[in-house]
Image (cartoon, rainbow, N blue to C red):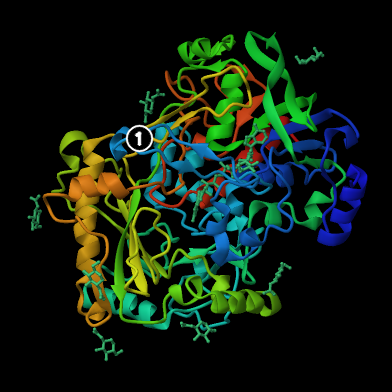
Amino acid sequence: MLTPSFLLLSLFVAGGFGKLYDNAADLPGFKYDFVIVGGGTAGNVLANRLTENPKVSVLLLEAGVSNQGILPSEVPFRLSELFAPSVWNWNYTSTPQTGLLQRTLAVGRAHFLGGCSGHNGMAFTRGAAAEFDHYAQLTGDQGWSWNNLYPYFLKSEKWSPPADGHDTTGQFNPAVHGKSGPISVSLNGYQYPEFSSKVIATTKQSPNDWPFNLDMNSGKPLGVSYLQSSIGNGERSTSATGYLAAQYIQRSNLHVLVNSQVSKLVNSTQKSGKLSFGGVQFQSGNKLYTAQAQKEIILSAGVIGSVQVLQNSGVGPKATLAAAGVPTLLDLPSVGQNVTEHPTFFIVWSVNSTDTQEKVTKNATAFAEAQAQWNTSRTGPFVTSPLGTHVGFKRLPANSSAFAAHGDPQPNPSVPHLEFIFIPGGQLSSTIVLPANATNFMSIAVSLRAPISRGSININSNDPFAHPLIDVGLLKEESDVLALKDATAMALNFAAQPAWKGYIEQLITTGLDDATIETTIRSIASQSFHISGSNQMSPIGASYGVVDPDFRVKGVSGLSVIDVSTLPLITAAHTQAVTYVFAERGADLIKKRWNC
Ligand SMILES: Cc1cc2nc3c(=O)[nH]c(=O)nc-3n(C[C@H](O)[C@H](O)[C@H](O)COP(=O)(O)OP(=O)(O)OC[C@H]3O[C@@H](n4cnc5c(N)ncnc54)[C@H](O)[C@@H]3O)c2cc1C
Ligand SMILES: *[C@@H]1O[C@H](CO)[C@@H](O)[C@H](O)[C@H]1NC(C)=O
Ligand SMILES: *[C@@H]1O[C@H](CO)[C@@H](O)[C@H](O)[C@H]1NC(C)=O
Ligand SMILES: *[C@@H]1O[C@H](CO)[C@@H](O)[C@H](O)[C@H]1NC(C)=O
Ligand SMILES: *[C@@H]1O[C@H](CO)[C@@H](O)[C@H](O)[C@H]1NC(C)=O
Ligand SMILES: *[C@@H]1O[C@H](CO)[C@@H](O)[C@H](O)[C@H]1NC(C)=O
Ligand SMILES: *[C@@H]1O[C@H](CO)[C@@H](O)[C@H](O)[C@H]1NC(C)=O
Ligand SMILES: *[C@@H]1O[C@H](CO)[C@@H](O)[C@H](O)[C@H]1NC(C)=O
Ligand SMILES: *[C@@H]1O[C@H](CO)[C@@H](O)[C@H](O)[C@H]1NC(C)=O
């Protein structure tokens, strides 16, 4: 048996880590200026930025384990190994989805330092400038406009060369990227030249439908761009490897405690007519402890965790809390509502090529060689995300039947409704069965980035450690299925361009004809893992929403939520870039209000 202090020492020696505590009994104290709940994508940004001032003390509580030595997290290509139930995963299951023929989904959420930035697909997309201008309108706060957020996009990012050192001219726009932030972002460092050149040829053969876009992160995402990923040096870049790198985690004013799940907020009082919590209760080594925040408690436990802590603490919809046996301290009806997720499915083809991801995924010798190559030189097929080579953002056609019931959900014609991800392989979809008589595949991931459907997250027990009910709400609204029907036609149009003749052999995803497509979509659609909005930001004084535009929980003093749960509306993009930016601006707002 290793003692906690021995563990601490060995981590320090092995990983260059500073003060990473494994057990609350080893903490020097329980009083801090700020207590941050959740060492995930957003939480680590806050821990870093708030401790830039050596006078400010921070305790960061993470339920999961340390991120050190989790090989499938470090090796970009191996991320899907993190999805099976393990100590690295919260093992959540959704409620039966009414829009998906009552299927349940394994809702992936990471259970280690770095949170979902440590097991996500690494695709790095900001969204459209007009979406953030819409945020400013939705929240009544100009601070959320594209121009005002742009410096934060740059601040969090470190544009990095690809692992293969290829010439990246014409593959991105250097002018729109940050150079010295904590999160490395790069173009793919391993190529599938045959596939990639066919994607680019398609943009030339069909420039009206599939125009080439030099850089989807310029604020104008429409078109087909080279994939950018949170990868540097052939390794995954996460909020833990970036914002908690050795020089930050070693700060004496920052204490990071892993294996410590927060149960609820305690020691409630009324402060000038507002509810206030004096303490954060958490479990460590089978014991309950309480830490105090002298300035503020910050919930960064993610789209599920932050809701659960609020509801466990008596802040949420009164009827939900009453049914779960939790006394209501503040009836805040929006906590856990308006949950939004992007439905995605895969169209897969078998192809006449051996240069696809299957050359490593289906060949144990090649797989071991790729790992050895990654180990020795951080090059080869394992340095890229399995997500593919390019992404395409598209609008639905103006006459789409998807708009009949609710109109166009997007604020402006520069904002996409759909994303297509082009993948030289067939392994990513869990709902498409690959035939045994073919060896190599390609896929297009088809995703609706402007869904109308909404779900919810609600506790149904007063055991603070029980899983809540998670309804991701996929395809509840018929219009979302109609949108995906149009999207399917677009993806098939892409693959019908001359570039793919002689390459594509056979369509593997069947049932896409008019008569069956709706049932097919409901049978094969799944998550994008972008769930957000469960603690929605809304204007000061609004009758709905959970946090004000400065992240303060409405009706509570000294409590903020800062993570992807606070998005006023889901972005038409992957959600990690916006999470980093919300956390960066959140840190500045907190520094300003405490003058620290
Ligand atoms: C499988 C998957 C693939 C994805 N792919 C992409 C992609 O390719 N590109 C992209 O941009 N986005 C992607 N995303 C989405 C993106 O990663 C998330 O939206 C984002 O990371 C969320 O950040 P967060 O800070 O809100 O939450 P998280 O990063 O989940 O952080 C929450 C942290 O809080 C901890 N926690 C929870 N409850 C408690 C508690 N009670 N006490 C203490 N700690 C607690 C958790 O363990 C976790 O570490 C993906 C997500 C997943 C899951
Ligand atoms: C998830 O399930 C696995 C396998 O059952 C288990 O070992 C692991 O501890 C679970 N994760 C959590 C966070 O409880
Ligand atoms: C805070 O609440 C915890 C848990 O309920 C309790 O043990 C502790 O005594 C309280 N502390 C104060 C100062 O009231
Ligand atoms: C959900 O969000 C919309 C605005 O997008 C708002 O009008 C509505 O009241 C919210 N619902 C809840 C339950 O908070
Ligand atoms: C598997 O990979 C090894 C090593 O790269 C290679 O020599 C072998 O030909 C491959 N096998 C098949 C069936 O492609
Ligand atoms: C690569 O390195 C990891 C971690 O150090 C090790 O576990 C693994 O065995 C190595 N694999 C190969 C093929 O060298
Ligand atoms: C939408 O318009 C296009 C031409 O722009 C036409 O081909 C298509 O049939 C129309 N679709 C519907 C549903 O009206
Ligand atoms: C593979 O098998 C399917 C039937 O399962 C058949 O339709 C298809 O033509 C076969 N493909 C090849 C390449 O042999
Ligand atoms: C597969 O591609 C090769 C050339 O790369 C070609 O000779 C062959 O005809 C193709 N096969 C089919 C079935 O298209």
At x 52%, y 45%, the residue is: 108
- Quadrant holding ligand 3? top right
At x 28%, y 40%, the residue is: 409
In the foreground, 373 or 451: 373
Quadrant the C terminus occupies: top right
Residue 517: percent from the left, percent from the top? 18, 50
* Residue 425 picture quarter: bottom left
Residue 24: percent from the left, percent from the top? 83, 33
In the foreground, 125 or 260: 260
At x 59%, y 15%, the residue is: 314
The count of marks equals 1
At mark 1, the secondary structure is loop
Residue 379 visible at all:
no
Residue 87: percent from the left, percent from the top? 65, 45
At x 57%, y 27%, the residue is: 308
| 163 sits to left or right of 146 | right
Residue 386: percent from the left, percent from the top? 48, 65
Dot 1 crowding, Cα within 10 Å, few <14, some 14–19, many 20+? many
In the foreground, 76 or 369: 369
| Residue bearing mark 1 | 97
Position of 287 relative to 277 (above/below): below
* Residue 4 picture quarter: top right
Position of 268 relative to 30 (above/below): above
| 24 sits to left or right of 565 | right
In the foreground, 456 or 33: 456
Amino acid type for the residue under numbered disc 1: Gln
Residue 362 visible at all:
yes
* Residue 65 picture quarter: top right
